[in-house]
Amino acid sequence: MLEKLFKLKAHRTNVRTEIVAGLTTFLAMAYILFVNPSILGATGMDKGSVFVATCLAAAIGSALMGFIANYPIALAPGMGLNAFFTYTVVLHMGYTWQIALGAVFLSACIFFALSIFKIREWIIRSIPLPLRSAIAAGIGLFLALIALENAGIVVANPATLVGLGDLTKPGPLFAMLGFIVIVVLEARKVTGAVLIGVLGVTILAIALGYSPFGGVMSMPPSIAPTFMQLDIKGAFNVSLISVIFAFLFVDVFDNSGTLIGVTKRAGLADEDGNIPKMGRALVADSAAALFGSLLGTSTTTSYIESAAGVSAGGRTGLTAIVVAILFLLSLFFAPLAGSVPAFATAPALLFIAVLMTSGLAEIDWKDITVAAPVTVTALTMPFTYSIANGIAFGFITWTLAKLLTGRWRELNSALVVLSVLFVIKLGWLSA
């Protein structure tokens, strides 16, 4: 049956290899079980319910990818998008988390339509590669600011906006320790480095009496507080258009980048770098985001940590199915997730920020019409506490820089139209 479903022999793999690969991928991305409830819980959402939603969304998404596309790619609520959901849409813009979930649902519906009608390629071609790198880096810097704030390393300062926190307190010390542990383990190619760092700091904090211990296992909490609580009607708001676009935009490029990177590493792409069954993979991804919003979590997306499983030999969807099963088993570890303090998840956020900002190395910094929009995009996100604002300012700066320097041939209609819409949107918000 497994041979018929996943064509193991054709992909030169076997059941044992796929199981090991699935376990490897799960360990590399299991930190989301502790980080996602911590981030979304800041909106007022029930953390126990978010934990269950995270497990189920990851399980459903990974299973869909495995069965529909037969790719060794796992899914879960995305980092960066969960921060945007919490810190921009809910805490900064003032919308309820129910409306934010409605926006996630609408963006997933649009993504699903784009995948079905194959419009995704047109959108990706319309956005210059440097801007895509800038958006990833900006989200990374945004996560870094949140991480440093959660750890107590960066605090508010009325004179300078931000300042250095009290580094003698337990929170900053534990966070710095956790970050170093993760970096060292990652450098030594230890599988599950982020998960080990988060759990290591948690255990140490509990042992020293700085954090309460809620237990390890129990029956799963109720999902009722978040299940089907999304407000789709409330998300049909003019001011939320840019939010829906930001969810959609980041999800489209995040998925595309992950699919390209992982399939290339697995040897599944053709000689020209094209990915067979890309349409199926995107349908699975967008469907997973739909289910996630109904369950009560931010956008579910493909995880680059799937590359860890590919390195362990994973080549088919059976790897993703194994990850799905492990996320279902994780439902019984809710007390452990509730015992993880904010300063223990902060190192994970900071480490993800490091990975996301690395794309800036590919930018042509000698071309000022490229360097300026990239810098504006990356810096506007953390300094305005909004991914959407960063995308808007980046698009506008890119378009004006190319237009006014006589390089208008490097623009396209989609980029110009989006820039005009962003100018109108920003002007309307300022009015």
Image (cartoon, rainbow, N blue to C red):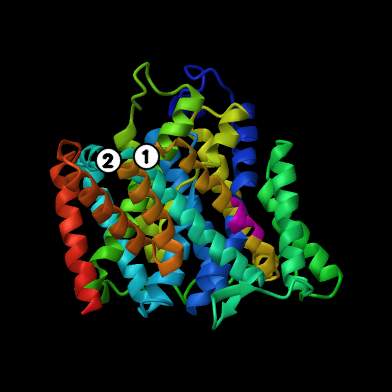
What secondary structure is the magenta-colored segment mainly?
A: helix
Q: Which mark is residue 18?
A: none
* Closer to viewer: mark 2 or mark 1: 2
Q: Secondary structure at mark 2?
A: helix
Residue 70 visible here: no
Q: Disc 2, disc 1: CB below 8 Å?
A: yes
Q: Would you name the residue on which mark 2 appears?
A: 124
Q: Is residue 108 left or right of residue 322?
A: left
Q: Quadrant of residue 425?
A: bottom left
32 or 324: nearer the eye?
A: 32
- Say if 27 sits above or below 314 in the image: below
Task: Locate the C terminus by quadrant.
Answer: bottom left
Q: Provide residue 99's location: percent of width, then percent of height.
A: 33, 74
Residue drawn at 54 percent across, 58 percent down: 55
Residue found at the very far bottom of the displayed protein: 158
Measure the C-alpha gap from mark 2 to mark 1.
9 Å
Dot 2 amino acid type? Ile
Label 2 Cα crowd, 10 Å radius (few <14 / some 14-19 / many 20+): some
Which residue range is magenta in the image? 347-351
Q: Is residue 348 left or right of residue 208?
A: left
81 or 27: nearer the eye?
A: 81
- Say if 197 sits above or below 341 in the image: above
Q: Provide residue 293's location: percent of width, then percent of height.
A: 38, 63
Q: Secondary structure at mark 1?
A: helix
Residue 299 visible here: yes
Dot 1 amino acid type? Ser
Q: Quadrant of residue 367?
A: top left
